[in-house]
Amino acid sequence: MQILTKPVLSTSSVLRCMPLGSVRHNHWITSVFSLKTSLPLRAEPKKKKKVDPRRELMVKERLKKKVKKLEKIPPELIPIEDFIPPAKCFDEIRVRTPPKLSFEDSERRALLLKEWSRYKISQHEAEMAAIEEALKAQTQALKELRLESAQLYKAAVSPDNCLFPFQCHGPCYTPPVPNQEAPDGKYNDITRVYTQ
């Protein structure tokens, strides 16, 4: 520690020294008499970490295992609200109790249901057979017509515009209005956002 002194003239005109204060020679405290404009910066570059190749390989393997686990888990499907019935349908309780049928009635109903199913199967088979026969007859007739004349074959294969009585008056394509800004309309977006 060093004490700075300054000569001061007193009333008795005796020259004596008076201490101004103690100043430590420390780099953190700047002296009044020093010419330093800023504190010395005690900075150094960051220490380089020693890279261990085995540790890096282990980290990479862990990440690969995590990715494999995530791939094995099936993705959560976003529910379609139209296919989910409301809870009211499940909560409703049947008020009217069904009548208890006798054994003869239940047997009669079961036999009637079996007979109805047999009738519908035979009807379906008859319809499929009729359609197949009609298609075979059509292909055979077209083959013979092709051998007769190509023009008649093309006319038979071409679509018939007069099959349905449809009449249209006016332009088919409406030209757009120039400089028209179509209104978007007002709507409330109530779609739920699902995060995976």
Image (spheres, rainbow, N blue to C red):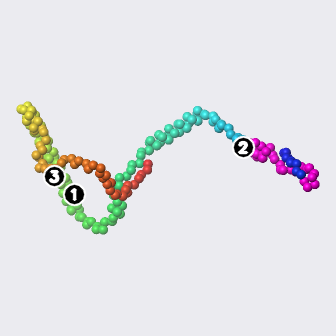
Residue 127 point in image, percent of width and height = 14, 47
Residue range highlighted in magenta: 10-39
Residue 122 appears in the rendering = no
Q: CA distance from mark 3 to mark 1?
A: 14 Å
The answer to which of 118 and 52 lies nearer the viewer is: 52
- In the rendering, which numbered label is found on residue 110? 1
Q: Looking at the picture, does residue 155 appear above or below residue 115?
A: above
Q: Which mark is residue 37?
A: 2
- Which of labels 1 and 2 is toward the front? 2
Query: Disc 2 or 3, which lies upstream in sequence?
Result: 2
Label 1 – label 2 distance at C-alpha:
108 Å
Tell which tag, 3 or 1, sits nearer the viewer. 3
Describe the element under mark 3 as helix, strand or loop.
helix
Residue occupying image coordinates x 61% and y 34%: 51
Q: Which residue is mark 3?
A: 119
- Residue 81 among magenta residues: no
Q: Which kind of residue does numbered mark 2 sit on?
A: Thr
Residue 44: quadrant of the picture = top right
Which comes sooner in the sequence, label 3 or label 1?
1
| Amino acid tagged 1 | Ala
In the image: residue 169, left or right of residue 28? left
Percent coordinates x, y for residue 64 in the rendering: 50, 38
Q: Amino acid at mark 3?
A: Tyr
| Residues packed near mark 1 inside 10 Å, few (<14), some (14 to 19) or many (20 plus) | few
